[in-house]
Amino acid sequence: MRFLPLIYPTAADWLACSQKRVLLFGMSGLGKTHVAAMLRGAGDWFHYSVDYRIGTRYMGELIADNFKREAMKVPLLRELLMSDSVCISSNITFDNLAPLSTYLGKPGDPARGGLPFAEYRKRQDQHRAAEIASLLDTPHFIERAGEIYGYPHFICDSGGSICEVVDPEDAADPVMQALARNLLMVWIEGSEAHTAELVRRFDRAPKPMYYQPDFLTAAWHDYRADTGLDEAAVDPDAFVRWTYARALAHRQPRYAAMARRWGVSVTADEVAGLRDAGDFAALVARAIDRAA
């Protein structure tokens, strides 16, 4: 059962609409940002990046303060900071979200770049609050995009963790309500082959990510029970590698529920074949027909 009607009830409504508004969601690495950048390049789509909003509006000061904390350990930089002779800030962009992920960090051995688990959980909670706030800002940016900049169309590039900060099975979920009333929610669904490739890619370069609190607590407990390691002895990269495939499996049914209850779905293979905004419009039209 769908909790709210689609804002474009039919493919014809979507194609004829002069103000298209879409939110893309799904696992990181399947093309959300690529599609958003392609549409932005078409000239008449406003690109709203949730992760960029998190890293600037809501966590920018936390990120910069963390940089300053590290800089204060260096005598020369400490002296310059104390005399306001240098400015340290985050240079986060749509294409480079490293300052945000670096701040989020990984739990474990400090000598290997890890954070104490309590501090790690604190930063996870900060990210959760920031992500919810950034998602709820979406309707405001839809209005801004048209009123100030004159963009007729709007694409919201959500983070991979969107499914962790909403309850897609709750018809009264405030974030899902706000999003589905204002945009067409489109899941980019990966295959088992895509998942396996994402796991291989992550294994080569493990990155920080956000986890749903109960999932994270269970994963941390199970990993330490399996390895017999004290908190400070955990290899941060080994833990996030161990957790990644489990996190993807945890997210998959949540994404599916978001599409079933609140939106539509397309496949990552379909997305990979897109060449321009016209192809995207046609793909979404087919997805609406399938959902109907």
Image (cartoon, rainbow, N blue to C red):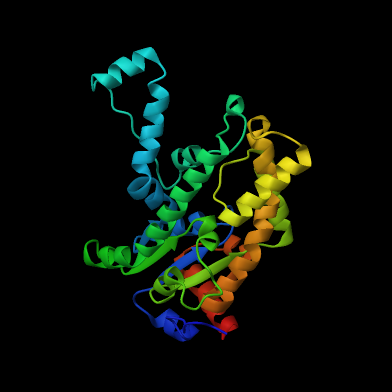
65 or 100: nearer the viewer: 65
Residue 247 in picture, x, y percent from top left: 65, 54
Instruction: Locate the C terminus and report the quarter of the image it occupies.
Output: bottom right
One can see residue 197 in this view = yes
- Residue depicted at 44% across the width and 51% down the height: 51
The answer to whether residue 91 of the structure is visible from this angle is no
Total marks in image: 0
Left or right of 254? Residue 152 is: left
Residue 256: image location, x then y, percent: 61, 70
Quadrant that contains the N terminus: bottom right
Q: Position of residue 175 (x, y in %)?
A: 43, 68
Q: Is residue 67 above or below residue 80?
A: below
Front one among 288 and 76 = 76
Q: Quadrant of residue 78?
A: top left
Task: Left or right? Give the position of 71 relative to 268.
Answer: left
On screen, residue 89 above or below 123: above
Residue occupying image coordinates x 23% and y 19%: 83
Query: Would residue 73 appear left or right of 201 to someone viewing this image?
Result: left
